[in-house]
Amino acid sequence: MESGLPKTRNGSHVDGFADVPQGLLAKPLKAWPAPPVFTLVPNAIQMSDTGYFHLHLVSDATGETLIMVARAAAAQYANVAPVEHLYPMVRSKKQLDNVLAEITEAPGLVLYTLLEEDLIQILEDKCRDLGLPCMSVLGPILRLFQSYLGAETMQRVGAQHVLNAEYFQRIDALNYTMFHDDGQHVDGLEEADVVLIGVSRTSKTPTSIYLANRGVKTGNVPLVPGVPLAPAVEKLTRPLVVGLYASPERIVQIRENRLLGLKAYHDDNQYIDKSAVAEEIAYSRRLCAKHNWPSIDVTRRSIEETAAAVVRLLSERRRQPIG
């Protein structure tokens, strides 16, 4: 018996639900409304020749979800860039009226994560009148959850920001990370989940803070030429120790920019001498090999990508059998 799901040309069900038995998806109590996407009237709104377009993000909470989704999508278009207009904590008609006035003044794409039906209707009606594309970011996901779980949403605004155990774990991790930044209090590093080591300008601190915001207690220790690594770090057993390194060219470039900003640039400075920097990095690699610590090349990685690699290593380590 067919499940009633749409099929592709080869006969398999779309969205990864191939061969789903009848009744596996629960019958929804009340369908979540489909997100409206209003097609623009041809030539009604012209994007500026500068390659910029207005992107309006309307949220009844902090707007973090909207920002991440919008930027991930916008990053796929190399020749255009969004001018972001973020409207967080929109929970009343008066607040929404102010938003609509700005959208009218600077027309563009409109994305929202509102849950209040009255506010949604007002926003959609206005966008329809202006001929603007308007879409709920959460709508399709909520419909998928609802079709599978067979339960209506509670429509709790900002439900992901509740003060639960996970939230306080993140705060605790952030406090720990700030206290153990840049080689401070190495005697307490045994309590960390992750310890990052590396030469100067390998993004140890921002990566540590990023990990802490995800509940990972992270310390970091710099490798300084002529200064031996603290014995307490070499004896660590509980935390995952990860070495961060980059190409000498990249390190020199970052250091030169930093010194120029501080107006402390000197051509004979060993801090930016390519040969000296190459030796620093070589020492870092040897140290990690000696202790069997994994290393990550951050030359072309963003902070987010480096943190994701660390989390993957941490997950693999925790899956390993003890003993």
Image (spheres, grey):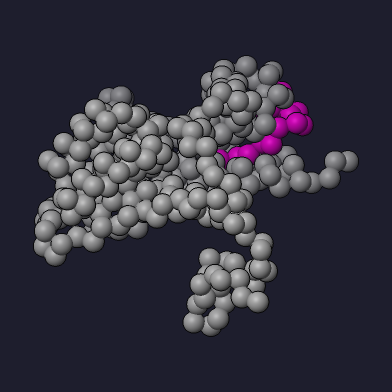
Q: Residue furthest right?
A: 323
98 w.r.t. 32: above or below: above
Q: Nearer the viewer, residue 193 or 283?
A: 193
User: Is 228 one of the magenta-colored residues?
Assistant: no
Q: Nearer the viewer, residue 76 or 158?
A: 158
Instruction: Please report the residue visible at 45 percent of the width from the left and 32 percent of the height from the top.
Output: 157
Instruction: Please report the residue visible at 11 percent of the width from the left and 62 percent of the height from the top.
Output: 43
Q: Position of residue 15 (x, y in %)?
A: 53, 65
Instruction: Please report the residue visible at 48 percent of the width from the left and 53 percent of the height from the top.
Output: 31
Q: Quadrant of the N terminus?
A: bottom right
User: Is 234 one of the magenta-colored residues?
Assistant: yes
Q: Is residue 28 visible?
A: yes
Q: Nearer the viewer, residue 263 or 210?
A: 210
Instruction: Please report the residue visible at 30 percent of the width from the left and 24 percent of the height from the top.
Output: 262
Q: Position of residue 8 (x, y in %)?
A: 50, 77
Q: Is residue 204 visible?
A: no
From the viewer's perspective, is 106 left or right of 201?
left
The magenta span reads 229-248
